[in-house]
């Protein structure tokens, strides 16, 4: 069973994604509102197979979070979830090592398809 951490500043979205993923037999081992909670989880030796990472937060930059993830926790796979579909941003996300990008709004079938594709 794949272990997932969900990082998004929307509590409603974190809960709905968690419920959906668990119904598809994924194990959500943590959720985080931002980088502080995420890195607290990872520094406690929690080892996810995948991190769902939003790009935009009120006081943070998802690019910085992704950069730190890939520097300090390189083996973990990252699915970036964002509402911004801009070529320059997409290129930067890919260059930093994200495994894929999923654009909001999405349905849970899109999400599970993106996750399965990462692990093929």
Image (cartoon, helix red, strand yellow):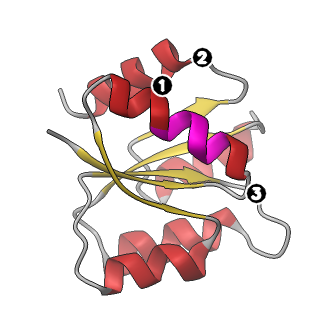
Identity of the residue drawn at 23% across and 52% down: 49
Residue at the far right: name it. 58
In the shown orientation, is residue 105 left or right of residue 106? Answer: right
Q: Nearer the viewer, residue 10 or 49?
A: 10
Q: Which region is colored magenta?
A: 13-18
Q: CA distance from mark 3 to mark 1?
A: 18 Å
Q: Nearer the viewer, residue 36 or 85?
A: 36
Q: Which residue is mark 2?
A: 107
In the shown orientation, is residue 27 left or right of residue 93? Answer: left
Asked if disc 2 and disc 1 are in contact, CB closer than 8 Å, the reply is yes
Q: Which mark is residue 48?
A: none
Q: CA distance from mark 2 to mark 1?
A: 7 Å
- The rendered magenta stretch, by its main secondary structure, is classed as helix
Mark 2 crowd level (few <14, some 14–19, many ≥20, 10 Å Cα): few
Residue 96 picture location, percent across and down: 48, 61
Residue 120 picture location, percent across and down: 17, 26
Identity of the residue drawn at 78% across and 39% down: 84
Q: Is residue 17 magenta?
A: yes
Mark closer to the observer (2, 3): 2
Identity of the residue drawn at 29% across and 85% down: 44
Residue 53 picture location, percent across and down: 54, 53
Identity of the residue drawn at 75% across and 74% down: 60
Give SS at disc 1.
helix
Q: Which mark is residue 111?
A: 1
- Is residue 75 positioned above or below 92 on the image? below
In the shown orientation, is residue 71 left or right of residue 54? Answer: left
Q: CA distance from mark 2 to mark 3?
A: 19 Å
Q: Is residue 111 magenta?
A: no
Mark 2 or mark 3: whose residue is earlier in sequence = 3
Asked if disc 3 and disc 1 are in contact, CB closer than 8 Å, the reply is no
Give SS at disc 2.
loop
Q: Which mark is residue 56?
A: 3
């Amino acid at each position: 069973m794949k272990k997932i951490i969900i990082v998004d500043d929307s509590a409603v979205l974190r809960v709905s994604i968690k419920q959906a993923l668990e119904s598809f037999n994924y194990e959500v081992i943590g959720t985080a509102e931002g980088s502080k909670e995420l890195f607290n989880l990872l520094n406690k030796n929690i080892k996810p197979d995948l991190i769902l990472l939003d790009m935009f937060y009120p006081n943070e930059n998802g690019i910085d979070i992704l950069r730190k993830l890939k520097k300090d926790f390189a083996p973990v796979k990252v699915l970036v979830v964002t509402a911004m579909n801009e070529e320059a941003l997409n290129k930067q996300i890919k260059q930093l090592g994200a495994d894929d990008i999923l654009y909001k709004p999405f349905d849970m079938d899109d999400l599970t398809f993106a996750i399965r594709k990462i692990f093929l």
